[in-house]
Image: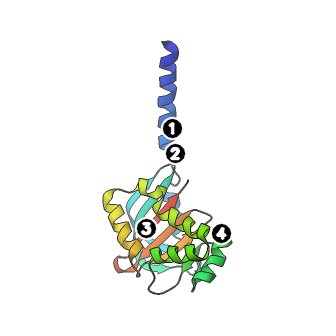
Amino acid sequence: MAARLNLIGLVCVLSALLAGCALDKEADLRRHLSGWIFVAQTRYFTSKMVCTVAVFDLARSEISSKVSRATSIDTALIRVHKGIPVLFDIPDISPNSISEQLMSRDLGKGLGMLSTGVGPAKDCMDDDVAAAYFAVLMSPETRTVYDPAGDALLMVYPPENLAFFLRGNV
């Protein structure tokens, strides 16, 4: 009986420790993203062992020139293969379409971007954030930055000065 209680206690302690493990801390993420975008207020932040989702208001919806730009899918794919964060600087193309075009050229890299945005990250979204994310994912007005090495996707939505950040860890 005592051994069983000790095992239950150990399971409870491990569960509590693991629940506290998160991929990102909000302050660290804000600091990292401040090199790329003009982060204002945090609207939403959740980070767990397998995912991070954050939504930020932006002071300006510009993306820093520090982020490598690609004006075509082929140029972006070169940067993705090198593990370099890349801004898809392609007018009138949604993040969803970018992912489809990446998959048509390199299935693995396209699926990598897609899984970052719709894989484990869905477990870090409430229903309201998920609905807003879907709208931004499908909008050709959205500016997309993919960081393949960091398993991260940043989507800047200029009409509302919003940024969605998603990271998955599978």
Q: To which quarter of the image does residue 86 belong? A: bottom right
Counting residues from the start of the chain, the first of labels 1 and 3 encountered is 1
Residue sitting at the far left: 128
Counting residues from the start of the chain, the first of labels 3 and 4 encountered is 4
Percent of width and height locating residue 119:
48, 58
- Separation (CA) of disc 2 from disc 3: 21 Å
Marks 2,3: beta carbons within 8 A? no
- Separation (CA) of disc 3 from disc 4: 20 Å
Give neighbour class at mark 1: few <14, some 14-19, many 20+ (Cα, 10 Å).
few
Counting residues from the start of the chain, the first of labels 2 and 4 encountered is 2
Which disc number belongs to residue 111? none
**Under tag 2, what secondary structure?**
loop
Looking at the picture, does residue 1 appear above or below residue 62? above
Give neighbour class at mark 3: few <14, some 14-19, many 20+ (Cα, 10 Å).
many
- Separation (CA) of disc 2 from disc 1: 7 Å
| Residue at numbered disc 4 | 83
| Residue at numbered disc 2 | 21
> Which residue lies at the image location 50% right of the left edge and 77% below the top edge?
98
Type of residue at label 3? Phe
| Residue at numbered disc 1 | 17
**Under tag 1, what secondary structure?**
helix
Type of residue at label 4? Gly
**Under tag 4, what secondary structure?**
loop
Marks 2,1: beta carbons within 8 A? yes
Percent of width and height locating residue 93:
46, 82
Counting residues from the start of the chain, the first of labels 1 and 4 encountered is 1
Percent of width and height locating residue 47:
46, 53
| Residue at numbered disc 3 | 164
